[in-house]
Image (cartoon, rainbow, N blue to C red):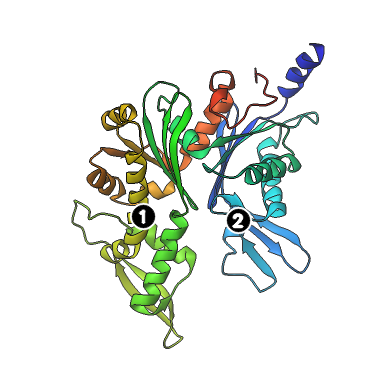
């Protein structure tokens, strides 16, 4: 009893943290402070020495601009760890930066990490091991669609159906949630990164123009769309790259209609996954979903007209949650702040004690 009391006193000097460990971007939520950090999930490494040169925003600036011995890489692919050691270094950077200026007397913080739905036990263990090696004490996991639904303030613990579609960088998670658990879900390895690839391939096929990933992402954000916009404004943007025929730099104008054509196949696959999930949803929950609608979160949900197209294809009203890019981090943070009430939504709670 005395030891538990002492542990709680010491823990008050530590910063408990929730991390949305994303393929493209990672967000860090500190208990009592909210989201304190949003950084690209990119690490720059000197291959000659093995030394990490930069993490996050600084590393992203190096993508496509480094000499051959410096590689800017993403340690997560499709939402799961592909490089354990680099992920560990990235997590240590996040944890240390979140703890900066806090006297923690050697007490390791509790950490909640968002993971894609349906990852294997080996992949879960890899995340927990990397976090512990990076300086975390207890590590708990929460599935991203559950965290997104909580971040959207849906009534996940009630006996009603909540339909959430979380479109991140590496994966699209489609889930029906009720009574604090996932009733049915689908995970699709098509999301923001794949949409960037689609634009790159379109530029090569249609214009014989070679462009980089960052350029493709900028075009997607500027004029990308899944459905014609009501304002009828013809959006267009300059696209710069290397002509594959002449080998010389070239600039062409790409239109919103071009991007819609480029993204059409991937968007259709996302919608088909949503339809399949709807077909497998129990009728009682489907009635709730028809009343409450489909909710979209994640950076991919910001693609213009996607909500309109999903609503048209499913005959269910569809809306984007407030601040969709931070929904998973907010949800994981809300669990962190209310762990006594929301512990059941975690993947596992072994060794869990009240935070207060």
Q: Is residue 146 above or below residue 234?
A: above
Query: In the image, residue 23 lies at what x, y percent?
Result: 54, 51
Gap between marks 2 and 1, in whole Å? Answer: 27 Å
* Nearer to us in this view, 199 or 115: 115
Q: Give the residue displayed 56% in from the left and 69% down from the top.
A: 64
Front-most of 187 and 43?
A: 187
174 and 299: which one is in front? 174
Residue at screen point 58% across, 22% down: 339
Sequence-first tag of 2 and 1? 2
Local crowd size for mark 2, using a 10 Å CA cut-off: few (<14), some (14–19), many (≥20)? many
Residue 29, x across and y down, in percent:
57, 35
* Towards the viewer: 297 or 162: 162
Q: For the residue carrying disc 1, how many other residues have a C-alpha within 10 Å: few (<14), some (14-19), or many (20+)?
A: few
Q: Quadrant of the C terminus?
A: top right
Who's the residue at 38% across and 59% down the image? Answer: 220
Image point (40%, 77%), residue name: 209
The answer to whether residue 334 is left or right of residue 139 is: left
Residue 49: mark in rendering: none
The residue that mark 1 highlights is: 269
Farthest top residue in view: 1
Q: Quadrant of the N terminus?
A: top right
- Please identify, in this view, whether the residue under mark 2 or under mark 1 is nearer the observer: 1
Image position, residue 320 (x, y; %):
34, 40
| Above-or-below relation of 62 to 333 | below
User: Number of callouts in the render?
Assistant: 2
Asked which secondary structure carries label 2, the reply is loop
Q: Which residue is mark 2?
A: 42
**282 on left or right of 68:** left
* Left or right: 166 in relation to 143: left
Splitting the image into 4 quarters, where does residue 159 fall?
top left
């Amino acid at each position: 009893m005395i030891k538990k009391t002492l542990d709680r006193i010491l823990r008050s000097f530590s910063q408990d943290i929730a991390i949305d460990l994303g393929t493209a971007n990672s967000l860090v939520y500190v208990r009592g402070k909210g989201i304190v950090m949003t950084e690209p999930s990119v690490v720059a490494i000197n291959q000659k020495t093995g030394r990490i040169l930069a993490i996050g925003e600084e590393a992203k600036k190096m993508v496509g601009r480094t000499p051959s011995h410096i590689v800017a890489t993403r340690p997560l692919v499709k939402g799961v760890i592909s490089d354990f050691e680099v992920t560990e270094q990235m997590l240590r950077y996040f944890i240390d930066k979140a703890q900066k200026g806090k006297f923690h007397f050697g007490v390791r913080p509790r950490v909640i990490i968002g993971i894609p739905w349906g990852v294997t036990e080996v992949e879960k263990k890899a995340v927990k091991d990397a976090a512990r090696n990076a300086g975390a004490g207890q590590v708990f996991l929460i599935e991203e669609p559950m965290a997104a639904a909580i971040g959207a303030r849906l009534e996940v613990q009630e006996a009603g159906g909540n339909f959430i579609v979380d479109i991140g960088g590496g994966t699209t998670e489609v889930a029906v949630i009720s009574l604090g658990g996932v009733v049915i879900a689908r995970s699709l390895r098509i999301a923001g990164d794949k949409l960037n690839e689609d634009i790159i391939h379109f530029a090569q096929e249609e214009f014989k123009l070679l462009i980089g990933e960052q350029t493709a992402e900028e075009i997607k954000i500027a004029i990308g769309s899944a459905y014609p916009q009501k304002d009828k404004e013809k959006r267009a943007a300059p696209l710069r790259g290397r002509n594959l025929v002449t080998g010389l730099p070239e600039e062409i104008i790409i239109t919103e209609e071009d991007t819609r054509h480029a993204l059409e196949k991937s968007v259709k696959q996302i919608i088909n996954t949503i339809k399949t999930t709807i077909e497998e949803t129990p009728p009682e929950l489907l009635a709730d979903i028809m009343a409450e609608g489909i909710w979209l979160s994640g950076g991919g949900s910001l693609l213009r007209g996607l909500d309109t197209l999903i609503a048209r294809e499913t005959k269910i009203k569809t809306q984007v949650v407030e601040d969709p890019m931070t929904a998973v981090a907010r949800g994981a943070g809300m669990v962190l702040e209310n762990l006594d009430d929301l512990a059941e939504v975690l993947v596992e709670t072994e060794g869990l004690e009240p935070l207060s």
